Amino acid sequence: MSSRVKAIKTRVSAIKKLDKRAERLGEQLKEVNAAKDKLQWEAIDLMDKEGLKSIKDGDYAVTVSEMDVPSLKDFMSLWNWAKKNDVPEIFQRRISSKAWREHEQDVPGVVTYTKRSLSIRSR
């Protein structure tokens, strides 16, 4: 076995160990974020019950903020409105890779690049 192949195997082994570590950390992060979200909703609920929009306590200034966020209900209505009102910027400017692959040769205005990655699967 060549020294390069040994070096590759060493790196793959290290990658797999880091994958396992990342998975454990990801699970811990999920738990931490869930606990944080729960406390935030409890704090918002308590502030609502007290009629407070903000509160200052020592080193912290806490404010309940609200923001309207769009959720797509009828794509064709939005599409027609955007065309009629010349508002193409309402759409994110990215391509669905799956849809692009289905029409790869027929899509104008698209350039491709080759994304390289390393795939490691357990045997």
Image: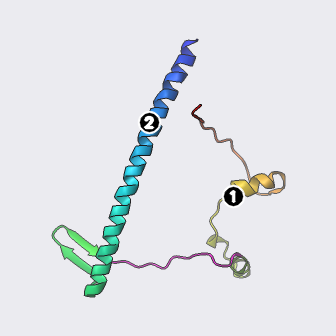
Q: Nearer the viewer, residue 81 or 3?
A: 3
Residue 24: % across, % down: 40, 44
Q: Residue at x 44, y 33 (%)?
A: 17
Span colored in magenta: 64-75
Q: CA distance from mark 1 to mark 2?
A: 30 Å
Judging by the rendered image, the residue that carries numbered circle 2 is 18
On screen, residue 44 above or below 23: below
On screen, residue 84 above or below 20: below
Specify which label sits upstream in the sequence, 1 or 2.
2
**Could you classify mark 1 by the number of other residues whose Cα lies within 10 Å: few (under 14), some (14-19), or many (20 or more)?**
few
Q: Secondary structure at mark 1?
A: loop
Please state, as top left, top right, bottom left or bottom right, where the C terminus lies in the image. top right
Q: Residue furthest left?
A: 58
Q: Is residue 73 magenta?
A: yes
Q: Quadrant of residue 82?
A: bottom right
Q: Is the magenta region chiefly helix, strand or loop?
A: loop
Q: Residue at x 76, y 57 (%)?
A: 109
Q: Residue at x 45, y 39 (%)?
A: 20
How is the model colour-coded? Answer: rainbow
Q: Nearer the viewer, residue 98 or 21?
A: 21
Residue 103: % across, % down: 81, 55
Which mark is on residue 96? Answer: 1
**Seen in the image, is 77 located left or right of residue 27?**
right
